[in-house]
Amino acid sequence: MALTYEQSAALMKDAVFISRIKVACLKFASYINGEAPTVPAHSTRIKWAQQTFTMPDASASQVTPITVMDPAVQEAGLDAEGLCPIDDAALQSAVENSVNKML
């Protein structure tokens, strides 16, 4: 079941969830850093990656709202403790999809 607007808004402010998004951003930035310069939009992607290495909290903050609205996160819902039980691999994909939408 998809999250309600209230639950989505709360998840956008959840420090633990934002920290997980930050780790996913850094992992994706590392991947982008190693990709070939021929990848479409590489110059934009590498700038984002460099900014993420320098200011990971800012990147996570920027990516969080889009990630929360990703279908995988919405469908994961919240557990009894109010935490999003999405696993790391699914969250990584949601973050990468969100970054690609931004870039």
Image (cartoon, rainbow, N blue to C red):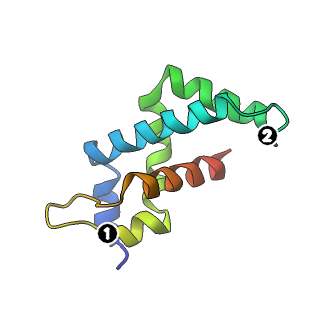
Pick out the residue farthest to the right: 38
Please give left or right for residue 94 compared with residue 38 in the image.
left
User: Which residue is at the far top?
Assistant: 54
Label located before the other in sequence (2 or 1): 2
Give SS at disc 2.
loop
Q: Which mark is residue 51?
A: none
Q: Which mark is residue 41?
A: 2
What residue sits right under mark 1 in the picture? 77
Q: Amino acid at mark 1?
A: Gly
* Mark 2: amino acid: Ala
Q: Is residue 61 visible?
A: no
In what element is the residue under mark 1? loop
Residue plotted at (39% across, 72% down)? 75
Q: Position of residue 41 (x, y in %)?
A: 79, 40
Left or right for 11, reference 75: left
Which sits in the foreground, 23 or 2?
A: 23
Mark 2–mark 1 distance (CA, rounded to whole Å): 33 Å
**32 up-or-down from 17: above or below:** above
As drawn, 74 above or below 18: below
Q: Where residue 88 sits: x, y (%)?
A: 39, 51
Quadrant hosting residue 51: top right
Query: Do the residues under discs 2 and 1 have CB atoms within 8 angstroms?
Result: no
- Residue for point 63% across, 32% down: 48
Where is the N terminus found, in terms of image quarters? bottom left
Q: Is residue 78 above or below residue 62?
A: below
Identify which residue is drawn at 21% across, 66% down: 79
